Image (spheres, rainbow, N blue to C red):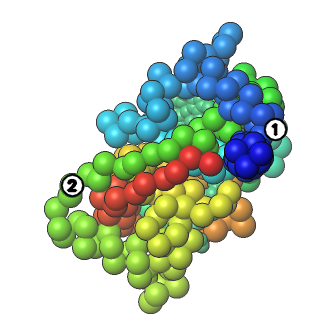
Amino acid sequence: MLILSVLLFSVAGCKHSSENRSLIAEGERLATKGEGPVPACASCHGQNGEGNNITAFPRLAGLNKDYLAKQLRDMAREMPPEGVVMDPVARDYSKTPRVNSDLTVFTPGLRHAPVMSPLAKNLSEQQINAVSAYYASLSYTAKPLPADYQTLERGADLALRGKPEYGLPACVSCHAPNGEGFGADFPPLAGQPPKYLIEQIDKWQTGERDNDPLALMKAVANQLTDADKINAAAYFANRSLVVKGQ
Ligand code: HEC
Ligand code: HEC
């Protein structure tokens, strides 16, 4: 009797309901094998969703499932036909000074990703939920990337202190003390390819990514210099991190 109740308890206490388990299994199939026009996510994001530092494909393993689903929906959304302000000259960074004008491309709620957007458009709502549940369920252990100490020191300064003299908060005040991320709105920075982090900040500056809640990250990105991006990215890529899948 005791054994039976222990058994029952452990089944009931299991963190995944059978419904959730089948959703995760469906997501795993899509992620590892692809389906119809959708290629296997693993072919770019890694066998275990660990990402790729060289190609700058982000890690998906252990990210919050609502964050993942939101990004997929944002990348799938079409550009609005009206109300888009585009300045062809200001968009070309090589020809213009670095004024990070909010008017370059104004597409709130969108995330333009040349590789991912066409792919995300092919995903059904069910597939988005399944593949997000799958990646959120994966555990992940970061392999800290080395960097020289000046870069790390400057990165740490920005990450832990920000630039109070310019009203710029520390990265960790939103992205959690070790850059491990917090909830559905604040993605991890630790354990992401440094090149990916830099590219995303660049995208906020050009307006290609404009999907953050309350434009919190946009306000931060617009205050960062190129050196800031490199230093902060190196700092977070240098963190140790162990994430347990949900
Ligand atoms: C051909 C390579 C490739 C394939 C295949 C691919 N991705 Fe991506 N993925 C990328 C790239 C590149 C980015 C960065 C997008 C950008 O420019 O912002 C990305 C970004 C993402 C992000 C955003 C992560 C973040 O931290 O914000 C999610 C979520 C994602 N991919 C999910 C998927 C899923 C799910 C699949 C499979 C259905 C998939 N990807 C297949 C290349 C790929
Ligand atoms: C005021 C809060 C806040 C602060 C401070 C902040 N961020 Fe963010 N950050 C966000 C939010 C919100 C998002 C995006 C969430 C979304 O798209 O849904 C984000 C996203 C990001 C991303 C994209 C991650 C991904 O997986 O695609 C990068 C890179 C980033 N932040 C870097 C930084 C750096 C570096 C700093 C410090 C210089 C910083 N952030 C400070 C709120 C903040």
Q: What element carries label 1?
A: loop
Task: Depth check: give the residue in front, 76 or 98.
Answer: 76
Horizontal side of 215 relative to 159 (left or right) equals right
Neighbor class of circle 1 (other Cα within 10 Å; few <14, some 14-19, many 20+) is few
Q: Quadrant of the N terminus?
A: top right
Report the amino acid beneath label 1: Pro
Q: Position of residue 120 (x, y in %)?
A: 68, 29
Instruction: Judge depth for marks 1 and 2 and give the one in front.
Output: 2
Horizontal side of 179 relative to 114 (left or right) equals left
Specify whether residue 44 is in view: no
Residue 227: assigned label: none
Report the amino acid beneath label 2: Pro
Q: Which residue occupies 47% across, 32% down?
A: 48
What is the residue that sits farthest to the front in this orientation? 1
Q: Quadrant of ligand 2?
A: bottom right
For disc 1, the marked residue is 81
Task: Depth check: give the residue in front, 99 or 108.
Answer: 108
Q: Is mark 2 on a helix, strand or loop?
A: loop
Neighbor class of circle 2 (other Cα within 10 Å; few <14, some 14-19, many 20+) is few
Residue 146: assigned label: 2
Q: Does the residue labelled 2 lie within 8 Å of ligand 2?
A: no
Looking at marks 1 and 2 on the same chain, the residue that comes earlier in the sequence is marked by 1
Q: Quadrant of residue 182?
A: bottom right
Q: Does the residue labelled 1 lie within 8 Å of ligand 1?
A: no
Q: Which residue occupies 63% across, 35% down?
A: 134
Q: Which residue occupies 50% across, 44% down?
A: 139
Task: Depth check: give the residue in front, 158 or 83.
Answer: 158
Number of numbered discs visible in the structure rendering: 2
Q: Quadrant of residue 4?
A: top right
| Spatial CA span between label 1 and label 2 | 45 Å
Q: Where is residue 101 in the image (x, y as percent from the top left)?
A: 57, 62
Q: Where is residue 130 in the image (x, y as percent from the top left)?
A: 72, 32
